[in-house]
Amino acid sequence: MANRSHTAALVVAAGSGTRAQPGNIPKQYQSVGGTPILGRVLRAFLDHADIDIVQPIIGARHQALYESLALHHPKLRPAVDGGETRQASVLRGLDALMHNAPSLVLIQDAARPFVSAGLIDRVIAALAGTRGVAPTLPVSSTLKRVEDGRIVATIDRTHLEAAETPQGFVFSAIHEAHQKAGSAGMSFTDDAAVAEWAGIEVRTVAGEAGNIKLTTAADIAGADRRLAGEDLLRAGEVHVGVGYDVHPLGPGSEVMLGGVAIPHTRGLIGHSDADVVLHALTDAVLGALGDGDIGQHFPPSDQKWRGVSSDRFLADAAARVRARGGAIAHLDVAYIGEGPKIAPHREAMRASIAKICGIPVARVGVKATTNEGLGFIGRGEGVAAHAVATIRLPFAP
Ligand code: MG
């Protein structure tokens, strides 16, 4: 047997998640707390000291979505394409792990982003004494058998428990069990069931009520609120910052506003991409932190900032908030210009700003006005933006 300490995690993300996909984004690629669900799940295993290798299994048509997670980690293996069913996908993932010869494997559903380090610890620890482990929780609701909208039986829930993931196994045992189940045409809804069928004893460890499976759009919205609320509640003090920026208009065919390229008859002139909206927001966040301004952190005299995309300025300011143990509660920006029209791009700008800062879209406001033809803005010589950032920080005497 291979070295017992070599433990792999298989993250099954090949589903198309049709019950929770506004805008056709499969649920594992939707965000909670500003981070895609799959990114959170992978991160939980990549960050765990006892996991040596992480193997994602993705949908064959989700390659571009997966690339957009931009995850890089020495433990992360290239994603493999899943099969027609969850079970077929797991088998492909186990096959892909073969040449790494892990001694143990934890198999995790991508739709459970709240998997804790403590649960991973318990599953690995229990594998010291058995070949299969599943976290379970007693069922608390009374269970009914329902046919045609009528209860036909009440099920005795004594001994009934609901299974979660990660489920852990001795690698060779579960790999062989999956190969056999696949050849026999047997289909199961989790890996513990495959193991049971193959005669592998599966012991239970305590699951966690918070380790929920996100199935519907309502589940995802609830998880988003829970994460945003947790960050904000940790930090009680309210700080507000303002930001203002101006850039001249010049020759060009598009302007960058809020990180979105908007076609226009002119362009914005500046050292970076001249995104006044992101510059004003960056100064507002830095102002709320009492941490200087954009020119101090990214001096225009420094050639390395020439032509750069301004999202990195705002992302840096948002990272400074997190580094202080805080959270961005709200961002609001007012763009002032005689063009281009902002309304058609407002939602794209809100989504872009939210993504840069890792906050829900509901916490971003974008507005625009003309200057009624007055002054330098009215004459079309330039545009401006005002921004307000409300952040929460831990109390600092
Ligand atoms: Mg500027």
Image: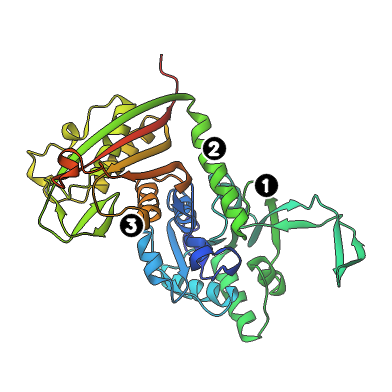
> What's the distance in space between the residues labelled 2 and 3, CA to CA?
28 Å
Given residues 330 and 175, the one toward you in this image is: 330
Residue under the image location 71 percent in, 74 percent down: 197
Residue under the image location 18 percent in, 39 percent down: 246
Q: Are marks 2 and 3 in contact (CB under 8 Å)?
A: no
* Place of residue 348 in the rendered image (x, y in percent of width and height, measured from the top left): 37, 56
- The local crowd at label 3, few if under 14, some if 14 to 19, many if 20 or more residues have their Cα within 10 Å, is few
Given residues 66 and 101, the one toward you in this image is: 66
Up-down: is 261 above or below 233?
A: below
**Does any atom of ligand 1 lie closer than 8 Å to the CB of label 3?**
no
- The local crowd at label 1, few if under 14, some if 14 to 19, many if 20 or more residues have their Cα within 10 Å, is few
Question: Label 3, on which residue?
Answer: 72
Q: Are marks 1 and 3 in contact (CB under 8 Å)?
A: no
* Residue type at tag 1: Ala
* Place of residue 45 in the rendered image (x, y in percent of width and height, measured from the top left): 47, 53
> Residue 195 — which label?
none
* Residue type at tag 3: His
Badge 2 marks a residue whose secondary structure is: helix
**Does any atom of ligand 1 lie closer than 8 Å to the CB of label 1?**
no
For ligand 1, give the image quadrant.
top left
Q: Is residue 140 visible?
A: yes
Q: Nearer the viewer, mark 2 or mark 3?
A: 2
Mark 1 or 3, nearer chain start: 3
Residue under the image location 65 percent in, 85 percent down: 185
Q: Are marks 1 and 2 in contact (CB under 8 Å)?
A: no
Badge 3 marks a residue whose secondary structure is: loop
Question: Label 2, on which residue?
Answer: 229
> Residue 209 — which label?
1
Mark 2 or 3, nearer chain start: 3
